[in-house]
């Protein structure tokens, strides 16, 4: 936190080298000997790209064998996801997660990272956090049984194609249940991440407390990553639309407590970030308001703008 009370990095964050560089840019001295020693060249984007290539190979293995190579996932994927989840600014997180190619595979890593962040914010135990990361990373494993012509279709699904696509939740549940040594919570997250609080999700149309806790967390991460990713048939949605949609979805679709924590903490991570407003001007986020986190206060040049009082103006995108 700066002398003016502006949050730079949320509490309970384990500091690493990128945190140090971010804090030093705000002229706050740090003893670098106390920081985790990470290579200077390591970036969130390189971590995510590495994990994406690894999950692609693992998915190819699962397509051939029909089971999850759990030890390989735990050894090669999970540590990278936990490291990526420690990056201090919202831009550094999003720049790595937003799919540039291989959306199907990068999406699994993206949902793994975001779910891990949510799990930390919800103060899950270390054991539960580890399970959640695995569950989120494998949430779409059932798509290995979906034909590529449907999976990679650039346009809207027909009703028949959509019915087939929805089966990936059941397929994922079966694959995970057929793998010795995997906790049932992991399988339930694969089965239930498209269920909704109002009972209008799939595959079973269950609601509320019938949906597993991991399923609820993964659902929030899944929706966010899908909306912020550019795909063949659609561009990524503007940042403010995504955050407003997350709030809207907390009324009936997504769990309101998880969604509220997610939006608040994500916006806190954006403090200090350079942003482009919907009118094209460049500014920097100064303060996030607890009661209205998606409309922070922004400094544009010498002008202080409270977006809560400027309903026509929003954050279009985060800049580096």
Image (cartoon, rainbow, N blue to C red):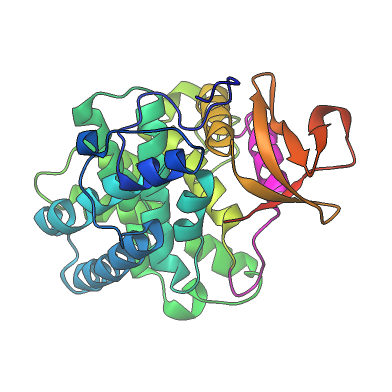
Which quadrant of the structure image shows residue 226? Answer: bottom right
Q: Nearer the viewer, residue 290 or 144?
A: 290
Estimate the x, y position of residue 110 in percent, counting from the top left: 42, 54
- 280 horizontally vs 230: left or right: right
Estimate the x, y position of residue 131 in percent, counting from the top left: 23, 37
Q: Which portion, as a residue range, is magenta?
A: 231-253
Q: Who's the residue at 23% across and 72% down the image?
A: 57
- 285 horizontally vs 178: left or right: right
Q: Is residue 291 visible?
A: yes
Estimate the x, y position of residue 111 in percent, counting from the top left: 42, 50
Q: Who's the residue at 18% across and 56% down the image?
A: 73
Q: Is residue 251 visible?
A: no
Specify the farthest residue to the bottom: 149
Which quadrant of the structure image shows residue 120? Answer: top left
Q: Nearer the viewer, residue 202 or 181?
A: 181
The number of numbered badges drawn on the structure is 0
Q: Is residue 254 above or below residue 70?
A: above
Quadrant into which the C terminus falls: bottom right
Asked whether residue 244 is drawn in magenta, I would say yes
Q: Nearer the viewer, residue 138 or 317?
A: 317
Q: Is residue 113 above or below residue 159?
A: above
Estimate the x, y position of residue 1 in percent, counting from the top left: 50, 24
Asked whether residue 261 is drawn in magenta, I would say no
Q: Nearer the viewer, residue 233 or 85?
A: 85
Q: Who's the residue at 34% across and 50% down the image?
A: 84
Q: Who's the residue at 64% across and 70% down the image?
A: 158
């Amino acid at each position: 936190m700066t002398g003016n009370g502006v949050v730079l990095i949320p509490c309970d964050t384990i500091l690493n080298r990128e945190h140090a560089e971010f804090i030093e840019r705000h002229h706050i001295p740090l003893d670098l000997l106390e920081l985790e020693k990470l290579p200077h060249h390591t970036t969130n984007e390189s971590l995510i790209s590495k994990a994406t290539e690894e999950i692609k190979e693992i998915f190819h293995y699962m397509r051939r064998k029909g089971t999850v190579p759990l030890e390989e996932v735990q050894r090669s994927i999970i540590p990278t996801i936990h490291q990526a989840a420690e990056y201090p600014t919202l831009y550094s997180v999003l720049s790595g997660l937003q799919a540039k190619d291989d959306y199907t595979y990068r999406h699994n890593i993206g949902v793994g990272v975001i779910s891990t962040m949510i799990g930390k914010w919800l103060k899950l135990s270390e054991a539960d956090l580890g399970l959640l990361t695995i569950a989120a990373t494998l949430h779409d494993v059932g798509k290995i049984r979906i034909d590529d012509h449907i999976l990679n279709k650039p346009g809207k699904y027909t009703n028949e194609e959509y019915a087939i696509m929805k089966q990936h939740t059941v397929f994922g549940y079966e694959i995970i249940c057929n793998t010795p040594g995997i906790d049932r919570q992991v399988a339930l997250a694969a089965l239930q991440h498209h269920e909704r609080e109002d009972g209008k999700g799939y595959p079973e149309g269950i609601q509320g407390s019938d949906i597993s806790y991991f399923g609820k967390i993964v659902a929030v991460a899944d929706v966010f990553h899908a909306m912020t990713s550019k795909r063949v048939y659609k561009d990524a949605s503007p940042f403010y639309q995504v955050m407003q949609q997350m709030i809207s979805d907390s009324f009936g679709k997504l769990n309101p407590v998880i969604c509220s924590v997610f939006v608040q903490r994500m916006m806190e991570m954006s403090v200090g970030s350079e942003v482009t407003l919907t009118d094209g001007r460049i500014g920097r986020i100064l303060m996030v308001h607890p009661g209205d986190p998606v409309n922070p206060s922004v400094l544009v040049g010498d002008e202080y703008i409270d977006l809560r009082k400027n309903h026509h103006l929003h954050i279009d995108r985060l800049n580096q």
